[in-house]
Image (tube, rainbow, N blue to C red):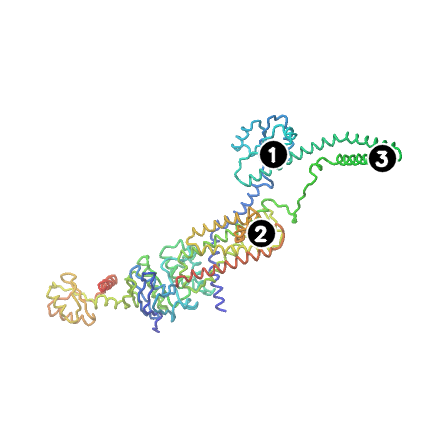
Amino acid sequence: MIRFFKFLIRLSSFMGKELIEIFRQPKLILTLVLGPFLIMFLFGLAYPDQGRTLRTTFVVTDPNSIKEQINTFTRSFSSSLVNYDIETDKVLALEKLANNQTDMVIVIPDAPLKTIQNNQQAEFLVYHNEIDPFQIGYIQSVARIYVDEINRQFLQSMVDQEQGDSKSLQENLEAAIIKTQAIRKAIPPGDVTTATQVADLEKDLTDLHEKLTTFRSLASGVVVSPFSEKVSGLFNVLLSVTGFFAPAVIVLLLQHVSITFASLSIVRETRSGIMELFRVSPITAFETLVGKYLSYLFFGSVLAGVITALAVWLLKVPILGRLQDYVLAVVVLLFASLGVGFLISLISETDTQAVQYSMLLLLASIFFSGFFLDLRMMKEPITYIAWSLPATYGIRMLQDIMLRGTSLPPLIFLGIAAIGIVLFLVDWILLRKKMESQYA
Amino acid sequence: MLDNIIETQDLTKTFGAGVAVQSLSMQVPRGTIFGFVGPSGCGKTTTVRLLTGFYKPTSGTLSVLGKPPTDFLKSDREKIGYLIQQFVLYPDLTVWENLNFAASLYGVGLFRRGRLNKLLDFVELRGDKYKLARDLSGGMKRRLSLAATLVHNPELLFLDEPTAGIDPLLRRKFWDYFKGLQAEGHTLFITTQYVGEAAFCDLVGVMYDGRLLMIETPDGLRRKAYGGDVIGIRTNEELRFEHRQQLESLPIVRGKVKIVSDQEIEVIVDDASTAVATLLEWSQAQKLTVAMMEQKSPSFDDVFIRLIETEVAHD
């Protein structure tokens, strides 16, 4: 019993020490709490819930002839083509593009109808000045949608015209049918061959009339685009940009804070020389490590609680799932992240090295954890890197619990818990070696 | 009880080709202040690290608290206090928090406030208990480290250069602390490069270039350095060459007579207490008026230098 109490007292030595050291830095705590909250808030303000508006310059040889059409087209692209102007000189337009006065230049083909009538496609030339592959992709999409829309409207106008023209054709057909009926009645009985031929003709004309009736009864929009789409999610939640990114920001912050604190913890003690005192004292590597884990778990949980509360109450980020699942996900994320941090601390020679490793991990987490890019877009071998980062599991867990309202995904939870346990064991072994290395 | 709390036999520690400690054999009786004296880099800290179990010996045997340090259990470690040369406590914790940390490290019970306050009184830091360690002076840091070493009331204390880099007044105070600890029953193994501090020890081990030259009492060291007791004689008359020759021929006198001035000399004798009478008789026979005759106590700096010089000459 006494031994157990002494064990608890020794654990408390590091718990108390680490927490006092952290809470003695109020500015640090304020930064840790308010920093991410402000970032999320500004992020929400900075990025509206729609795509980028492209300033567009149209190049046409005769602006007056086409201005109305351009107006009509751009209205249907109000979100992406709000600001536009028209130039007659392509070189001037491209100069504007190079000078960042416009985002996209669209050169409208000359005499497109003539080209089409010559059985050729009239080509729109679209120019941009982007280097970001995602922005290039965005412009390509906008251009494709833009041309599709022009094609659709062109076809629709053709259909409208043909539906109008078909009225007289239908009247002619009706007259033809009446005449055919009269001829059929005038055929003498017994002339079976002629009667059959006229009956067939009458039937063909009636079919054609019916088809024309159907064609004329259809709206031109339906004729041109017979199919449309309606997309629905299984989870009927409408999220703002802030709402979507909030769980990932919380995860990244908790992982980074845990890794940074833990990575500095042991390397500092090794360099200060106090490790020599630990080696001579009765404290063991296990007690040291557990004490440190508990102190940082406590601090990380408090930090997570405050940031989550701010996100929920001030930024209106939902937690649709169960709170206990959320707590469990945060704790297991902190546990695994601390394992990474202590590993860094045990293999680093200096504070600077530990900070560098932590920053590298943050960078890796931003790119590979699914924070920005969906993991399903990643190639197979790289996904192994992604799934070795606690943040990848954390983001999946928190997004599911907060935004989808599902329970803790069991496989993901087991995965991160396994990583945490393995890291704890590795850290324990390394710390034991460090504390006993001088015996050799 | 005067059993040995530390015993070593041919203890050797090498690092690669370098020998840090060579064939060290010694016994440290329980309840003593054992001074471990030697110049910087002579192997004092390595010896302490061997004795605390921080290093494993390359060869030889050692026993601390009755067993090799590498076999120490937690309960054995709780009996040891270790003051490291440099300040290793946490600068961002207060004096009180650092002391509490050290107490928890050794599993000292939670009702320890009284003991910690007593320790702070002992090292005269009670008024500074809420000061951050980084704001303390060098001497205060040293005292805090000492308090942290004593926090679990260890039976055996290893103090590695506890007085290094602090002023003479504070050094003296530290030795008063150490005497106080000895009086409470602690055994103190203290390394120092201030050879003058050997005077405060019960036993002194002289270390040089990884070797333990001798273990002696402070007086024994002097005797060993000079080959006996030193007696200073000053006369009213001039001491001539013949006088010195006669003195050197006396059976109680060892070696050459040292001339301090025309009227003052120093002689080395086997035993000062019995030699004084013989020397007075000799003075009277020579019709010399003795103005002063007393046993000299050479400084430990001189003693140490003489010992090292002898050792180097032997080599």
How far apart, in angstroms, are the residues tagged by discs 3 and 1? 66 Å
- Taking the view exactly as shown, the residue that stands out farthest to the bottom is B1
Amino acid beneath label 2: Arg
Tell me the subunit letter for badge 3: A
Q: Are marks 3 and 2 on the same chain?
A: yes
Quick one: SS at disc 1? loop
Vertical side of B128 occupied by B284: above or below: below
Tell me where residue B166 appears, x and y as whole percent: 33, 57
Where is mark 2, residue-wise? A396
Taking A362 as reference, is A77 left or right? Answer: right
Label count reads 3
Q: Residue at x 54, y 58 (%)?
A: A418
First in sequence: mark 1 vs mark 2 = 1
Where is mark 3, residue-wise? A195
Tell me the subunit letter for badge 2: A
Where is mark 1, residue-wise? A82
Quick one: SS at disc 2? helix
Question: To which quarter of the image does residue A54 belong?
Answer: top right
Q: Residue at x 60, y 28 (%)?
A: A60
Q: Nearer the viewer, mark 3 or mark 2?
A: 3
How far apart, in angstroms, are the residues tagged by discs 3 and 2? 76 Å
